[in-house]
């Protein structure tokens, strides 16, 4: 009986110790139980002017990652941008076309796109003072210019079909393909 009591006590102790050890205070802006207005006011009060201006920066994203085999890492240029300019957004990170010089050989397929987005976000969250996630913006008015995505006719071409149903279907395909890229 004594051994059962000891074993039971050890089980309770092992189970409860991590609960008591994890009393981490959550900053107001990180508390999902508070209203957005309260969280936003707290975050803005903590931000420096440089951090606020940095949130408005939107550099080109296709230069911000490096691919090594099946892994994607933040580039040195990205790390420098975050350190020196506090950039809060990237545009066209997943894009692949002649302008970006990203191809099937050096661009992001859907799997690598998701890895790139995760790697960039992780770096920002772990290497900035406030850990504000980055906004990753993509442009897709007639399809996402990315590996593994479909490019459709431009708006005027779609309008010439006189088919709102077709335009809606195209929009749904674009949305699905961007989600498959991690967007």
Image (spheres, grey):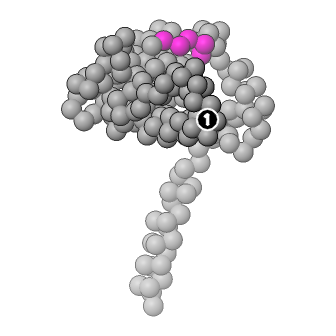
| Left or right, 181 with reference to 48 | left
- For disc 1, the marked residue is 163
User: Which stretch appears magenta?
Assistant: 55-59
Across and down, in percent, residue 52 comes to 64, 13
Element marked by disc 1? loop
163 or 174, which is in the foreground? 163
Relative to 97, residue 161 above or below: below
Residue at x 35% of width, y 34% of height = 148
**Residue 117 covered by magenta stretch:** no
**Residue 58 covered by magenta stretch:** yes
Quarter occupied by residue 1: bottom left
Across and down, in percent, residue 146 comes to 39, 27
Across and down, in percent, residue 74 comes to 36, 23
Relative to 114, residue 132 above or below: above
Residue at x 48% of width, y 83% of height = 5
Residue at x 61% of width, y 35% of height = 163
Q: Could you tell me if residue 44 is visible in this image?
A: yes
Across and down, in percent, residue 45 comes to 72, 20
| Left or right, 6 with reference to 72 | right
Other residues around mark 1 within 10 Å, as few (<14) / some (14–19) / many (≥20): few
| Left or right, 173 with reference to 25 | left
| Left or right, 130 with reference to 14 | right
């Amino acid at each position: 009986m004594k051994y059962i009591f000891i074993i039971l006590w050890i089980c309770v102790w092992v189970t409860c110790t991590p609960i008591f050890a994890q009393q981490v205070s959550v900053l107001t802006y990180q508390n999902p139980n508070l209203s957005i207005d309260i969280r936003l006011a707290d975050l803005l009060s903590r931000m420096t002017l440089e951090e606020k201006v940095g949130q408005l920066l939107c550099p080109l994203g296709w230069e911000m990652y490096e691919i090594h085999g099946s892994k994607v890492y933040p580039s040195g240029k990205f790390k420098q941008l975050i350190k020196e300019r506090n950039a809060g957004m990237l545009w066209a990170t997943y894009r692949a076309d002649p302008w970006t010089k990203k191809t099937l050989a050096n661009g992001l397929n859907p799997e690598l796109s998701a890895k790139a987005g995760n790697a960039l976000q992780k770096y920002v969250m772990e290497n900035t003072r406030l850990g504000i996630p980055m906004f990753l913006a993509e442009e897709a008015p007639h399809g996402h210019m990315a590996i593994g995505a479909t490019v459709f006719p431009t708006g005027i071409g779609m309008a010439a079909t006189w088919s709102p149903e077709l335009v809606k279907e195209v929009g749904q395909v674009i949305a699905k393909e961007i989600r498959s890229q991690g967007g």
